[in-house]
Amino acid sequence: MLTDREMLFIDGEWVPAGADETTSIVNPATEETVARVAQASPDDVNRAVRSAANAFRNGPWRRGTVAERARILANALNRLATRSDELAGLITTQMGLPASNAAGQVSSSIEMGRYFLDVATDLPTTEIRQTSSGPAAVLREPVGVVAAIAPWNGPFAVAIQKIIPALVTGCSVVYKPALETPLDAYLVVEELTEAGVPAGVLNLITSGPGIGRALVAHPDVQKISFTGSTSTGREIGRVAGGAFKRVQLELGGKSAAVLAEDVDVELAMSGIRMGSFMNSGQVCASYSRILVPRGRADELTQALVAAAESLVVGDPADTSTTMGPVASRKQYETVSGYVDAGRSEGAVVATGGGRPSGLSRGFFVSPTVFAGATNEMRISQEEIFGPVISVISYDSLDEAIAIANDSVYGLHGAVFTQDPTVAARVAREVHTGTFSINSFTYNHEAPFGGVKDSGVGRDTGPEAVESFYELKTVNLTPEMVPVFEAAARPIDS
């Protein structure tokens, strides 16, 4: 068993949780308990938020320069890089991500964190504008206390994605990892603290949804950054809207990949193999609807079957494994229920549809391809969050675009074609926040996020850093311009 983590981090100290219960962390590949973590109480939430609020109002963190904060955070990222193997092992153990993928997640996440620091350092916190009403200074000021709430499917990546831009802009953070995957968060907090983040600026609480509700509703929280289900995001939106809190919500998806008539099959299968089955399909941006021209449906379905069957499903700690289990028993039951629903609605299981042979233990689901699906079926409309794709036929490119848009979600999408004109048309007409051409691409230097029920705001790119600032306009008299111009110079770079 790994070391139990029965403490919370509040106001710069590891403290006992107010609740007597602990949560068991289960390895989804073995179904064994590997650690126990604390369950926070509502009083713990209050203490953590008040600590963050006091640090924001009265502490030195927000009063320092961006460059000073960036130096501390860069040191923390360097320290985390030295623990890459440990972090990757925790990710694999907690949620079943194959070891090679977990190592890649750690390294790419650290690079993403460094990117955020570069963006923040280059972004002026004071700009002088000459307007028809006279000079004005536009200030970027940190929004305040941020409640950062993470999902279980990408624990370390989301920790970096939420914590680093919030801290570098001068905010204080209360971080709540997912109930199933909190272990790497302890390392993140340890290294940020050792690097010099002051007491109260970063707090860690662990527990389930009830504690998340208390965190979101706390009056001292100015912004909620949440990644997770649309249903939870909608509840957060209701609470935040009533209190005029800022929200950043990266929610569900049901992304369509359009395979055009001239599709390069080998290229498309490479993109879909990653885009549909990476992380056992537990990716909000995954391609779960594959739209194929009707005249090539049989050919392309067989290619999709071959791509699915080429995956090596098994022990995620084995370096030869390319797909591990889903993350929990609950998720296994959810995915299995959708497979049953697809069959009952008349779709045909072309491959998969159950537990892989030889894997009697663990929450393993075979990569599953449903042929003959229609866009009205539940498996085509609802987010499954597992290794299951629906193959849907279309008769024209117009129809393919209409099918792609016939969803409450709008997070990601793709087109696979050799015709740049077709690619541009589909990319422009499919209503999503993100889109890829002939690939499955996650680009942390460009904005990532959704439209419709896929959320509000963007979690990457310069926009992610900007989102933790409030804008303040100071209308100046001429004699005040030099004072504010001095603040606008890049003296802290």
Image: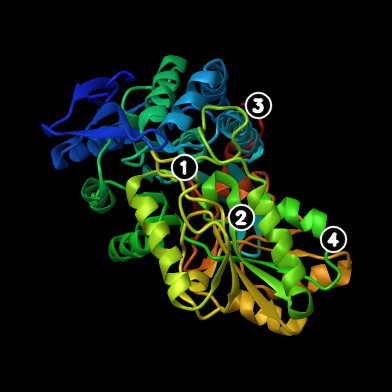
Tell which tag, 2 or 1, sits nearer the viewer.
Answer: 1
**In contact (CB < 8 Å): disc 2 and disc 4:** no
Tell which circle, 3 or 2, labels the residue nearer the N-terminal end: 2
Residue at image location 66% in from the left, 34% down from the top: 489
Residue 325 numbered mark, or none: 1
The foreground one among 295 and 492 is: 295
**What amino acid is labelled 2 in the image?**
Ser
Tell which circle, 2 or 4, labels the residue nearer the N-terminal end: 4
Which residue lies under the disc numbered 3?
Answer: 493
Which residue lies under the disc numbered 4?
Answer: 264
| SS for dot 2 | helix
The foreground one among 24 and 368 is: 368
Residue 276 numbered mark, or none: 2
The local crowd at label 3, few if under 14, some if 14 to 19, many if 20 or more residues have their Cα within 10 Å, is few
Q: Residue 438 appears in which quarter of the rendering?
A: bottom right
| SS for dot 4 | loop
Tell which tag, 4 or 3, sits nearer the viewer.
Answer: 4
